[in-house]
Image (spheres, helix red, strand yellow):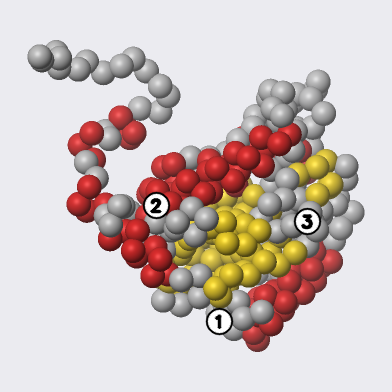
Amino acid sequence: MGLAVAQMGAVNLADTRAAVVRRLVEMLREAAARQAEFVVFPELALTTFFPRYWMDEAEAVARFFEKSMPNADVQPLFDAARELGVGFYLGYAELTPEGRRYNTAILVDRGANIVGKYRKIHLPGHADHKTEAPFQHLEKKFFEVGDLGFGVWNTEGVNIGMCLCNDRRWPETYRVMSLQSAELIVLGYNTPSLNIHWNEPAHLRTTTHEIVLQASAYQNAVWIGAAAKCGHEDGHHMIGSSMIVAPSGEIVARASGEEDEVIVARIDLDMGRMFREHVFNFARHRSPQHYRLIVERTGAGDPLPTPPVQG
Ligand code: CDT
């Protein structure tokens, strides 16, 4: 399969949806010209990373949420996908007809049909106004926890699972999808270089991003395509390092800058199959009876009673 990851440089507050979609279409065309059949775009790809700004929910909805998909602004991307026969993953802020707000990603097939939807489950940040912080991270204010679980869709003969940004740091995300035979997991992210919660050294933001993608690809025998929105959005810097990671844990393609940039790899789905048949043969080696705490506890608690040690 030809897999492209389309990293985006900054989207500033002043940028219109139409201008952003023109950038996405240009990258879709480049990906198609380089024989990609599927393109991964970032989280909240159509706007700036607006959870960094304090505002009320009504203002956020009016300025940054999509009320339908595709809508008139985004239609050119769907038209280009149909014309080129290229599927894609796209992240955006979703307002449902019932007025609910989610951080959402869609899976679009090569005929430009929306075949899957994911709503972000691990929402980082806070809901209160941190007046001392240089910026906010208001995902817990603007979005509800996703209600669709971690789905996997067979599209174009490949089992594709989706998640979004902070989800990539949690092992459960990948395992739930690999237990549904996911072969490829795609995700978009907006990772600020500064962590407002503690004085995390800037380089660790990229190191931890790499570690989770490489370890998760290996432990779940999946390919991962991860697309950043990065660079300086109105002065707020976010990491790049969009990448494609193999089930061996190796990084096979990586963005080199912090601008719009398409990376492409021919991914061999048989590589995942080999890991799934041997070291990570789930059916042979997993022991879910010993994993009960994973679904019984949310936060860490006391050690469980253990049988007395013999001998
Ligand atoms: N968008 C997103 O989920 N970003 C988070 C930043 C967490 S710091 C509050 C991430 O995990 O990259």
Amino acid type, callout 2: Asn
Tag of residue 257: 3
Tell me the element at label 3: loop
Distance between the alpha carbons at the discs numbered 2 and 1: 29 Å
Which residue was labeled with disc 1?
111
Q: Quadrant of the C terminus?
A: top left
Ligand 1: does it lie within 8 Å of the C-beta at label 1?
no
Tag of residue 183: none
Eye-nearest disc, 1 or 3: 3
Residue at x-position 31% and y-position 52%: 280
Which residue was labeled with disc 2?
220
x, y percent for residue 251: 57, 56
x, y percent for residue 165: 60, 47
Residue at x-position 60% and y-position 39%: 208
Above or below, 200 relative to 144: above
Distance between the alpha carbons at the discs numbered 3 and 2: 28 Å
